[in-house]
Amino acid sequence: MQRFKAVPLTAEAFAPYGEVLVHKGEVKLQPVPDAFDRTADAPVPSLALLRIDAANALPVVIDRLERHPFSAQSFLPTEGGRCLIIVCDTAADGSPDIASTKAFISEKREGITYKRNVWHRSVTALEAPSQFAVVMAQTSDGRDNLFFDLAAPIEIVAG
């Protein structure tokens, strides 16, 4: 089983996959322009609340990834603590490039926006309960989420 180390989330390390959402204190209202990146196929705005009642502990075994081809997806913490964020590049055939897997640990007040088409695992709470506002645009025909079951599970361990 391939193993990957989880490291602290930083804006620089996460930049190829999206944006770290944390108020920098420079202005009262801080825009998040990439949160609404979408194609014309996803005209329906969506705001949902995600609640996670069970915490995970490292190591975590992963056997499935997902991506959203038509919209960025943002997770804004409203309750809870640290989370595990797992991403990877896309291989030439469109599948996840497992060798490029990166794992990050976000702090209590850090949200994220995944860019469109970024392979990722659902947010994994390391402390519970956790709650998030989830923002994205959606199609009206159910093509919003693409899932990929890994041929072999991978393991995320503490860095």
Image: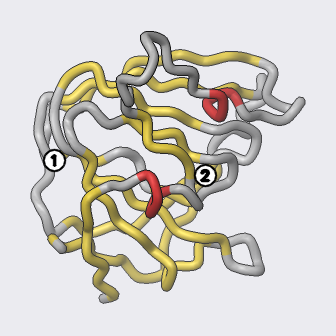
Outermost residue on the top side: it is 28
- Find disc 1 in the rendering and name its residue: 126
Q: Secondary structure at mark 1?
A: loop
The quadrant of the image that shows the N terminus is bottom left
Outermost residue on the bottom side: it is 1
The quadrant of the image that shows the C terminus is bottom left
Residue positioned 73% across, 71% down in the render: 94
Outermost residue on the front side: it is 26
Q: Amino acid at mark 2?
A: Arg
**Label located before the other in sequence (1 or 2):** 2
Residue positioned 16% across, 29% down in the render: 80
Count of picture labels: 2
Pinpoint residue 29: horizontal percent, then vertical percent.
48, 12
Pinpoint residue 96: horizontal percent, then vertical percent.
59, 72
Pinpoint residue 68: horizontal percent, then vertical percent.
65, 45
10 Å neighbourhood of mark 2: few (<14), some, or many (≥20)? many
Residue 159 position (above or below residue 125):
below
- Find disc 2 in the rendering and name its residue: 67
10 Å neighbourhood of mark 1: few (<14), some, or many (≥20)? many
Residue positioned 27% across, 47% down in the render: 106
Residue 15 position (above or below residue 35):
below
Q: Secondary structure at mark 2?
A: strand
Separation of marks 1 and 2 at Cα, in angstroms: 22 Å
Residue 108 placement: quadrant: top left
Q: Nearer the viewer, residue 17 or 130?
A: 17
